[in-house]
Image (cartoon, coloured by chain):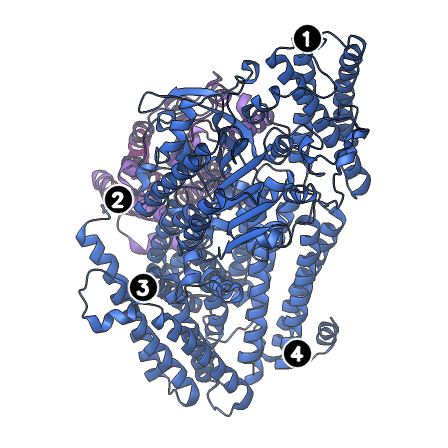
Chain colours: A purple, B blue
């Protein structure tokens, strides 16, 4: 059913996405360090100090912390997942990712005879803001902060989510409603391309959903701010979806091979 | 229990009485579990009934203030210490924030309420050695009753006393007032009548005034003022206590940053000025107030919203201002001066020091020469004690007459002796306590404390021996004395920290039993649901198939996620948003499902877009919480930039609620028309409609926008709310008449149920709306839309063959959504799980005077109206709206019972996890500030829900 050249391209998509994750990591000053993750003692000290600072605030001003607390907070330590400018980083990621995704997925457009490559690319470009709106609305319904100071972050985040979820479908299916319905509402992927669209998109959404969980915790880490941990969740989910879809495709192919034999 | 067993055994559905018995037994189980757990968890400190006696001091290793053999009938000699102060005037200003007293220069920004008590600044700067401002740090819970108890006993009152705050029981422990009376001091009290409840037989003269009417800013204060100044001229008292409540009430009603608050502070400034004038005019030797001390103090602080009860810095920081009238005193020993000084706005140098409120009782006892209260764990505060230092330096010590000592040395020696007595008393208390109480302190801690005490005592015996040997010369060298002081202070500090960290005595056995009963009730609950499922199976063969199990699974996930989130304090703070997150997730899944099935799209979209509004109102409610409250993660930019004072917004806020009310009323009116409503129920609903009109008139009258004619002005008062309550009571009695007298003869079960539900809901709605104020109708509207969407979206889950599936699988998701919506409503109507989250003002709508039962009922209705009363009484809608036209009374009742069982189970699961969390986190720093209030709210909510489920089962199930 699937030609070997198509296969090569599918694998290409996957390796590219792998590269992408590296890029994402580099963009976001991803300096792996394990001091903070396992350090529960630090966490406890911090908690104690924080409570003490509320108890013994000298001047009653709400931002006043005791000196001990301040020095603890400001102690130099390797920052894990610390991002200075969130909106810019997100913009960089989505632009790179979008160009890769649109150009690659447009190759697999549903009926190449009727729809030219450039048309698929245009369709995907149109799908990008539309998907962003859907994602942003979804995020706001679920509890994303609304407000002008969050506006840019939300815009870039939703564009990225759009690239992960709806843009591939837009470039492959164009405006074929039945296919959209099949993939996103019924989750019934058929071919390998369907898998490559469906699973990563669902993975990204589920990952983002789980990514929102640490946000209310009072660890006072910078990555707990609004779009960061959700983005990490989405990226992890997306990659997992990619792997899963790859696995599915390989597995199905193998079974067909066995049957054929 | 028996009923459940019978129910369990029998294969048939027993009808209403069976259902009622099941719900009743579940309620009994829950109450039992909660009772046992609460007894283990909240009642913690053993109150000892021992009292300190005057003669006890001879058992101590320290120097008594007088010789045992000398005739001690002369009271002036004192008992445990030499009295430094003859008379004491305590002016207690309720909820006195520290920044009311401290000069504004201590703060980064000068706020309007600062620098109002100028007289204190003036005195503190003019006489730095006799007048001093203290920052007093209270221990939570910062409610007045607890603080009064703490101030007088010198102990740490525990959480359960919060519950007693309304009933104010007399203090049975040894306390300052008891010691005063025992030692012949005459005490005069005026102001807050809580004192009389705490000390019913102690005062010589008392002028109590009712304290519970929060709206009343002046009665207590005016009463105090009227009696205070004349009393100051009288001779027939030794200790005067005047408790002013105005600041507390002004805070509760208007907040700190308000003109009534500033007026109150200015009024207090005037009063204090007069009091000081009177005292100073009579302070020359031989006069009445020759040796008087004035203490102006707060019992706790308050947040900017006027709330208190928790442990945030604003709430625990209060102030004590002390002024000793005896002159000339020695200068306070510089060695102990830990004060912070700053110039104030007029360039005067003002200092303040810190004191723990725990230390108050023992310090005052030491100043007056009384035995220290038996249960006190405080530490005689050096700076407060030093203010009256001059008063004994003029006399000569009776037995240790050492002329050569400088005044400072003598003071030090005296202070060391006082601390010696203090440490001995605390050690004695700790020992007695550990031997008497069931679970005392841990051995390790006790050993540590004993070691510290032994060290201090060893040092003491060395110095005192040497002083006996060299009787004629100054043997108390300053370094030795200092070492001694440090040793005692270390001991006392370690005892205080041990008591603070370790005081709460959990009875783990009771807690465990309570928790196990709770778990058992959950199992029983689940089995009942399963059982009912099987019973249904007889009637409708298409029980839960695989298609519906997705809803079931997701419902379980949502309930368990929410329940597990209680294990972390951060999630408890954000409980409302967690619930809205989960609800939004279910809504999105349903939207997806709706797209898949291409039906109910509109309802799904409406539901999805209702949720952001709920969430935003939850966030706004969070903003209303105190500025430095635990519950607030202040994000100043999060607030919308709306100028709330503009005319446009004013009129919008006046107009929108009334509009919403009209819409609600119209919907109700239409629903009577839709269903052929007749008989009593119709009149009940019409009664609520007229109530709605009354509410609209009431709000219109109270708004300032409309210039109403004089005729309507009369309606501004309490008349309308009272009418509404009365109509509500009449409606409820009508409904019970319907229940008792009118037997069901209707042909259409569905319609009659819908009308019954409507009648009950409309009965409650008018009262709840009036209590919750302007947000009421909007919340009702949101609840209506949400409920309608949930009901409509149930169709998505229905089998495509349109066969009626009646299993628990079918109802799992809608019931979960229903309960999540209820939780969201609780938070979005401006409540949160803390005692400052109660809307006390709601209890006084329609009433000016306080009546415990009446106000408690109103407060309960306001707190649980949207989260319990509406959702639970409205639950039959879920069943009735999808009941097929085919008449089957049995099946219908079983469905109803099923739905109620599931709702009860969901509530019980989350409460069980709260209990588990409280058990796990019982040593957490925030256990009293956060987990315990959450526990109390949940537990009360569960019991209420159980009661209401019982009532509904009686009422609805036929």
Indicate the position of residue B3 as horizontal and vertical percent values.
72, 75
Frontmost residue, B105 versus B69: B69
Which chain hosts label 1?
A: B
Q: Residue furthest bottom?
A: B745
> Under tag 3, what secondary structure?
helix
Q: Quadrant of the N terminus of chain A?
A: top left
Q: CA distance from mark 1 to mark 4?
A: 84 Å
Quadrant of residue B118 within the rendered picture: top left
Indicate the position of residue A3 as horizontal and vertical percent values.
40, 39
Q: CA distance from mark 2 to mark 4?
A: 59 Å
> Under tag 2, what secondary structure?
helix
Do the residues indicated by labels 2 and 3 lie within the same chain of the protein?
A: no
Frontmost residue, A43 versus B104: B104
> Under tag 4, what secondary structure?
helix
Circles 1 and 2 in contact, beta carbons < 8 Å: no
Do the residues indicated by labels 1 and 2 lie within the same chain of the protein?
A: no
Q: Residues within 10 Å of mark 4 (few under 14, many from 20)?
A: some
Circles 3 and 4 in contact, beta carbons < 8 Å: no
Which region of the structure is painted magenta? A96-110
> Under tag 1, what secondary structure?
loop
Q: Residues within 10 Å of mark 2 (few under 14, many from 20)?
A: many
- Is residue A107 shown in magenta? yes
Indicate the position of residue A118 as horizontal and vertical percent values.
21, 38
Q: Which residue is mark 1?
A: B477
Label 1 or label 3, whichever lies nearer to me, is 1
Q: Which residue is mark 2?
A: A127
Q: Which residue is mark 3?
A: B602
Circles 2 and 3 in contact, beta carbons < 8 Å: no
Q: Which residue is mark 4?
A: B18
Q: Is residue B800 left or right of residue B942?
A: left
């Amino acid at each position: 059913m699937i030609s070997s050249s198509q296969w090569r391209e599918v694998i290409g998509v996957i390796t590219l996405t792998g590269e992408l994750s590296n890029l994402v990591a580099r963009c976001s000053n991803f300096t792996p360090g394990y001091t903070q993750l396992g350090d529960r003692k630090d966490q406890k000290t911090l908690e104690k100090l924080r409570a003490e600072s509320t108890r013994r605030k000298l001047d009653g001003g709400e931002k006043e912390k005791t000196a001990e607390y301040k020095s603890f907070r400001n102690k130099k330590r390797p920052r894990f997942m610390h991002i200075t400018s969130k909106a810019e980083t997100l913009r960089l990621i989505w632009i790179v990712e979008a160009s890769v995704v649109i150009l690659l997925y447009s190759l697999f457009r549903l009926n190449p005879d009727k729809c030219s490559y450039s048309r698929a690319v245009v369709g995907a470009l149109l799908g990008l803001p539309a998907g962003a709106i859907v994602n942003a609305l979804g995020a706001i319904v679920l509890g994303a902060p609304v407000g002008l100071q969050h506006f840019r972050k939300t815009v870039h985040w939703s564009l990225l989510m759009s690239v992960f979820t709806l843009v591939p479908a837009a470039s492959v299916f164009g405006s074929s409603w039945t296919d959209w319905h099949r993939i996103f509402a019924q989750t019934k992927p058929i071919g390998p391309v369907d898998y490559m669209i469906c699973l990563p998109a669902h993975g990204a959404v589920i990952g983002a959903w789980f990514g929102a969980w640490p946000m209310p915790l009072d660890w006072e880490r910078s990555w707990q701010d609004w779009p960061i941990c959700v983005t990490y969740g989405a990226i992890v989910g997306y990659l997992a979806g990619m792997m899963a879809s790859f696995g599915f495709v390989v597995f199905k192919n193998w079974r067909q091979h066995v049957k054929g034999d | 229990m028996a009923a459940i067993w019978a129910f369990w055994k029998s294969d048939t559905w027993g009808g209403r009485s069976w259902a009622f018995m099941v719900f009743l037994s579940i309620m009994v189980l829950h109450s039992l579990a909660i009772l046992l757990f609460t007894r283990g968890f909240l009642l913690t400190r053993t109150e000892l009934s021992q009292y300190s006696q005057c003669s006890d001091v001879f058992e101590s290793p320290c120097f008594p203030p007088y010789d045992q053999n000398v005739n001690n009938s002369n009271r002036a000699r004192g008992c445990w210490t030499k009295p430094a102060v003859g008379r004491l005037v305590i002016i207690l200003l309720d909820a006195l924030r520290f920044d009311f007293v401290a000069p504004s220069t201590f703060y980064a920004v000068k706020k309007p309420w600062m620098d109002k008590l100028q007289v204190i600044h003036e005195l503190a700067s003019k006489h730095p050695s006799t007048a001093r401002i203290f920052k007093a740090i209270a221990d939570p819970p910062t409610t007045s009753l607890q603080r009064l108890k703490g101030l007088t006993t010198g102990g740490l009152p525990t959480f359960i006393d919060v519950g007693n705050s309304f009933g104010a029981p007399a203090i049975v422990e040894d306390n300052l007032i008891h010691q005063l009376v025992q030692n012949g001091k005459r005490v005069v009290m005026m102001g807050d009548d809580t004192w009389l409840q705490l000390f019913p037989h102690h005062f010589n003269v008392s002028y109590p005034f009712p304290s519970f009417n929060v709206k009343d800013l002046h009665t207590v204060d005016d009463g105090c003022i009227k009696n205070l100044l004349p009393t100051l001229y009288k001779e027939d008292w030794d200790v005067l206590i005047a408790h002013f409540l105005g600041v507390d009430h002004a805070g509760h009603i208007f907040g700190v940053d308000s003109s009534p608050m500033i007026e109150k502070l200015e009024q207090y400034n005037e009063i204090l000025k007069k009091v000081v004038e009177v005292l100073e005019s009579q302070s020359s030797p031989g006069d009445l107030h020759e040796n008087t001390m004035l203490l102006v103090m707060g019992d706790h602080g308050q947040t900017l919203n006027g709330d208190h009860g928790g442990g945030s810095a604003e709430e625990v920081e209060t102030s004590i201002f002390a002024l000793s009238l005896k002159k000339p005193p020695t200068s306070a020993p510089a060695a102990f001066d830990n004060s912070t000084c700053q110039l104030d706005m007029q360039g005067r140098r003002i200092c303040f020091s810190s004191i723990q409120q725990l230390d108050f009782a023992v310090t005052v006892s030491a100043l007056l020469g009384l035995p220290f209260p038996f249960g006190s764990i405080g530490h005689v505060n050096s700076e407060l004690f030093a203010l009256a230092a001059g008063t004994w330096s003029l006399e000569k010590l009776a037995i240790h007459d050492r002329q050569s000592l400088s005044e400072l040395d003598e003071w030090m020696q005296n202070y060391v002796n006082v601390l010696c007595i203090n440490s001995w008393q605390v050690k004695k208390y700790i020992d007695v306590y550990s031997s008497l109480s069931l679970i005392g302190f841990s051995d390790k801690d006790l050993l540590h404390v004993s070691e510290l005490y032994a060290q201090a005592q060893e040092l003491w015996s060395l110095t005192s021996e040497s002083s006996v040997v060299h009787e004629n010369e100054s043997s108390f060298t300053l370094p030795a004395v200092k070492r001694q002081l440090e040793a005692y202070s270390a001991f006392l500090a370690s005892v205080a920290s041990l008591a603070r960290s370790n005081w709460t005595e959990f009875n783990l056995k009771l807690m465990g039993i309570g928790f196990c009963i709770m778990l058992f009730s959950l199992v029983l609950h689940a089995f009942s649901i399963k059982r009912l499922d099987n019973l249904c199976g007889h009637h409708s063969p298409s029980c839960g198939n695989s298609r519906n199990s997705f809803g079931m699974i997701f419902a379980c996930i949502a309930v368990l996620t929410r329940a597990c989130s209680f294990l972390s304090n951060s999630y408890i703070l954000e409980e409302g948003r967690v619930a809205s997150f989960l609800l939004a997730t279910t809504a999105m899944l349903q939207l997806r499902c709706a797209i898949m099935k291409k039906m109910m799209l509109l309802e799904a979209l409406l539901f999805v877009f209702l949720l952001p509004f709920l969430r935003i109102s939850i966030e706004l409610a969070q903003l209303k919480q105190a500025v430095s409250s635990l519950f607030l993660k202040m994000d100043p930019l999060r607030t919308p930039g709306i100028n709330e004072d503009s005319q446009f917004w004013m009129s919008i806020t006046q107009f929108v609620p009334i509009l919403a009310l009209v819409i609600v009323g119209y919907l109700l009116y239409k629903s009577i028309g839709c269903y052929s409503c007749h008989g009593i129920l119709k009149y009940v609903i019409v009664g609520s409609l007229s109530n709605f009109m009354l509410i609209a008139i009431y709000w219109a009258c109270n708004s300032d926008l409309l210039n109403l004619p004089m005729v309507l002005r009369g309606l501004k008062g309490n008349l309308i709310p009272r009418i509404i309550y009365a109509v509500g009571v009449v409606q409820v009695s009508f409904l019970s008449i319907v229940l008792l007298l009118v037997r069901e003869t209707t042909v259409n079960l569905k319609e009659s149920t819908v009308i019954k539900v409507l009648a009950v809901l409309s009965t409650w709605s008018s009262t709840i709306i009036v209590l919750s104020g302007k947000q009421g109708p909007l919340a009702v509207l949101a609840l209506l839309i949400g409920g309608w969407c949930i009901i409509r979206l149930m169709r998505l889950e229905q089998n495509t063959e349109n066969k009626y599936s009646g299993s628990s699988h079918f109802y799992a998701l809608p019931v979960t959504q229903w309960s999540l919506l209820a939780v969201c409503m609780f938070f979005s109507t401006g409540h949160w799980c803390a005692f400052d989250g109660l809307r006390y003002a709601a209890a006084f709508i329609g009433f000016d005077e306080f009546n415990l039962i009446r106000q408690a009922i109103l407060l309960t209705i306001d707190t649980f109206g949207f989260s319990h009363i509406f959702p639970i009484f409205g639950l039959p809608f879920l069943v009735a709206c999808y009941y097929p036209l085919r008449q089957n009374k049995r099946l219908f009742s079983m469905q109803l019972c099923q739905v109620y069982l599931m709702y009860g189970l969901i509530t019980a699961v989350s409460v069980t996890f709260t209990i588990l969390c409280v058990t796990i986190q019982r040593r957490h720093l925030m256990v009293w500030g956060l987990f315990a209030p959450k526990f109390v709210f949940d537990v009360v909510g569960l019991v209420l829900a159980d009661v209401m489920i019982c009532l509904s089962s009686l009422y609805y199930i036929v």
